[in-house]
Each structure stands twice: as structure tokens, then as C-alpha cells.
Amino acid sequence: MKLKTSMVFLSVIFLLVLGCGEKEEKQSKEVAQFKVPVEYYTLDNGLKVILSQDKTSPTAIVAVYYNIGFRIEPKERTGFAHLFEHMMFQGSKNMGKMEFIKLVQENGGVLNGSTRFDFTNYFEIVPSHKLETMLWAEADRMRGLDITQDNLTNQQGVVKNEVKVNVLNQPYGGFPWLDMPQYANTNWNNAHNFYGDLKDLDAANLEDVASFFKTYYAPNNAALSIVGDFEIEEAKTWIQKYFGDIPASDLPEKPDISEPKQTEEKSFVKDDPLANKPAIALAYHMPKRNTPEYYAMGLLDQILIQGDNSLLAQKLEKEKGYTSNVSGGINYLGNMFNYQGPMLWMYDLTYDNETSEDEILSSIDEVMDTLKAKVDQKMIDQAIVKIRSQLYDDIGGTFGLGRADLLCSFALFDDNPERINTLEESFKEITPEMVKKTIDEYLVKTNRTILRVNPLLADNEKTQS
């Protein structure tokens, strides 16, 4: 067993810094430092384990993240990663179909799973005395699924129905979270329909399922985190007992998921027969993850679109009255921390039929053209306050589920879940000059993709009236 341990105690430390001098005014500065307890080690079979003890509530979270998401699912099998997420609830060696769900719920817990760009995750939140049961159950389905044609056919139908309900038969279905990556990106891994083409979903067969499971659902391609009320040594014993002898897999070489630099603005229109108002989304390719520019874009996200005081909300909602809500962010399927490959910073809004696209874009350009001149340390400090607030909400919310998410993501992508304790400092290192440099390099029209929804239902209503 390879052991890496980093124990830090949860604390909020208030430092009072007094500056004094003949020409200096006395000032005080309060700095809050949030520290998450992290113990990290790796089993001999490659499973990454992160333990974070918190006894404020008699609950425990078990989260298992597999390093397989939409980006690297097989070609001509779009939606396969998502389909496989559903298969994980169809039975395993010691549990029949849907018994995993029943086991959690009958023990007073909740559970879910999801498929994202770079991982598929499963979690359970249970009373702490049921932790061992959940570890046994997760290990049981990692060890082997009940892969049958009946289960596959059933879940193909479920996923196809989900696509129809959430995308094909909804106004603005898939806009912009599903649509924009297909327009803005070039590399197939980043640009395909990851929810799944109906023909591709039908084409999946048992051989595909068995191969996918054997390849990607293995301990050396996964991270396990436990957050909550538990004893460290006891949890380690259970993890070794249930996961320790699951064999590792031979992981294939990862495909190239890099995205070529965009050199000119792109603009597209999507006809929507169910929409009665136009909508618009704008996307910019993000800087590489963990670079200074990446953190600067996190600050610019707060400055431009997060909250009522954001510059685009002030312009488009308060001043112009074009829309009631500008929404967006970095990574529509999560947050700016839980992805690994190329990403878009994006925002979108609906607006009245009487308002033109040119009016919307003109107002947006007013904000963007004057942005660099407005950036100063005060603006950055205000953005950091908003980031800190959101980060603390995420880490502490839902019994610590946000904490489990970050710990698993940082283990999978960085081999360093301790990053959770350095995020705020990383933002504080960003200067106004770095923010301005990032604006010049990334918030430019040549890096921008515009997607507008053409509301055909509105046209039909006009014709009928």
C-alpha cells in the first residue's frame, strides 16, 4: 500500500493585521482560512482513496468517481458513457436489479449518479453507522455487473426517453449546455452529441457494455472518497477488505482531447419549433486548467455574470431591460474545478421578440470593450469574496457532497486532493495585470462563438394571429 497522508484540521482562523506608522492610517484586515481535513492514499490495485472526517452530523458520504466521461466514449456510440451510468444500477454479483437503490433508501439514505465531461460518479449519503454497508455495495458493483440483454434493452429505452423528454420535446432543449460544445469545439471528443444520438444508443450491444466495464470501471481508474462521521482506521480496514483485491485493468492510451486555437468568430442559428422567444448564448474557450490565466478567468466569471452586481447583469437586465436573467459560468455540467480537458466559459439569456440580436450584441460589446479599463484590485477583491462564498457553500452543502466532489476530482485529475485547501490562495495571487492579460488573450471576438435560438413557435403565433 502506497501511503500519502496530509492531515489538516477544519478551522476558521481570524488574523488581525494592524498597520501603523506616522504616515499610515491604522487599518485592520480579517482573513478567513478554511481548512478541510484530507488523508490520501492509494491501494495496491491503484484505487485512490480520500478520507475527510467531519463529525458535525451523524452521516457519511461514499463517492466513487471513475475517470471516464463523455469526451472519450467510443465513436459511433454517442451517449454510451451516460447509458453505462444507468447500467450500473441494474444489478451486480450479490445484488439483483435495482437492489442497490433499495438498499440505500431502506437504510435512510439518498443516492445518485451522473456522467460529466471527464468522469462518471456515484454517491450515497447514509447514516454513519451504515458506512460499511455502502462500501460493500460499491465494491460489489465495481467487481462485476450483471450484464444481460434484458438490462441493456431496458436502459436503452430509458435513456432514449430521457433524451426525448429533456432535449427533443422541450423548448430550448439542450440549449446551450448540449448545443454549444458541438458548435464551438472542433475535436470530435469535445464536439459530439454526448447525450446520445438515438441510432447510436440503439447500436450499443452486450460486447460494447462488457468491454467498456472491463476497461474503465476498474480500481486503477477510480477515486473513492468518504466524507463525514466515521473513524479513520476503521474505514481504512473496510476499504482494504472490500476493494483491495479487485483486479486492476489495462487502461488504453488516452485520446488526444486538445482543442485547436480558434482564430475567428463563429456564429450559428438553431431553429427551435417549440420556443416562443429568441435566446442567445456566447462562449469563449478557457485557458488551460490550473494556469494563472485559468484563475483569472474564474475572477472574470464573477465580475461579468455571477450575481446581480455583475457587469453583464447590470447592463442587460437593469439598464437595458432586455432580459430578466443572464446565467452562465465555467462548465455548465459542474463547476470550474471538476473537469480536466478543454472547457468553455459561457453565458446565455432569452429576450423579447421586439429586441434584435444586434441590440443584444451591441450592449455586450459595450461591456467587453470597457472591461479592461475598469479592472483594479478592488474589483478583484470583490470577485474573490464571491468565489469564497460559493466555494464554502459547495464544500459544506448537502452534508459535504461538494467536498467529496472536489476531493475525487483533484485526486483523479491532479493526484492531489489537498488542492481543495489552496484554491482561495490561488485566486488571491492573481493581479490586475494578469486579469487584463487574460482579457486580451481570451475575451476577444476571435475566441467567441455565438449561438442564437430562432423561435419558430413565435413565428407560427404571429401567422395565426
Image (spheres, grey):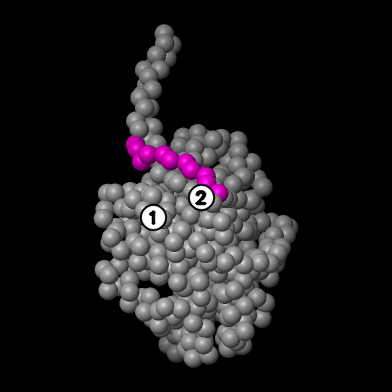
- Is residue 5 a member of the stretch shown in magenta? yes
Q: Is residue 247 visible?
A: yes
Residue 373 at what x, y percent from top left? 57, 39
**Residue 256 position in % (x across, y down):** 71, 63
Q: Which residue is mark 2?
A: 41
Report the number of discs: 2
Furthest residue to the top? Answer: 22
Q: CA distance from mark 2 to mark 1?
A: 13 Å
Q: Look at the picture and state if 428 lies above or below 315.
A: above
| Secondary element at tag 1 | helix
The three-letter amino acid code for the residue at tag 1 is Ala
**Which residue occupies 40% across, 67% down?**
136
Looking at the image, which residue is at 39% across and 55% down? Answer: 235
Q: Mark number for residue 235? A: 1
- Circle nearer the N terminus (2, 1): 2
Quadrant location of the C terminus in the rendered image: bottom left
Magenta stretch bounds: 2-12
Q: Is residue 167 visible?
A: no
Q: Is residue 132 left or right of residue 344?
A: left
Q: Is residue 191 above or below residue 230?
A: below
- What's the amino acid at mark 2? Tyr
Disc number placed over residue 81 in the picture, else none: none
Tag 2 near tag 1, CB within 8 Å: no
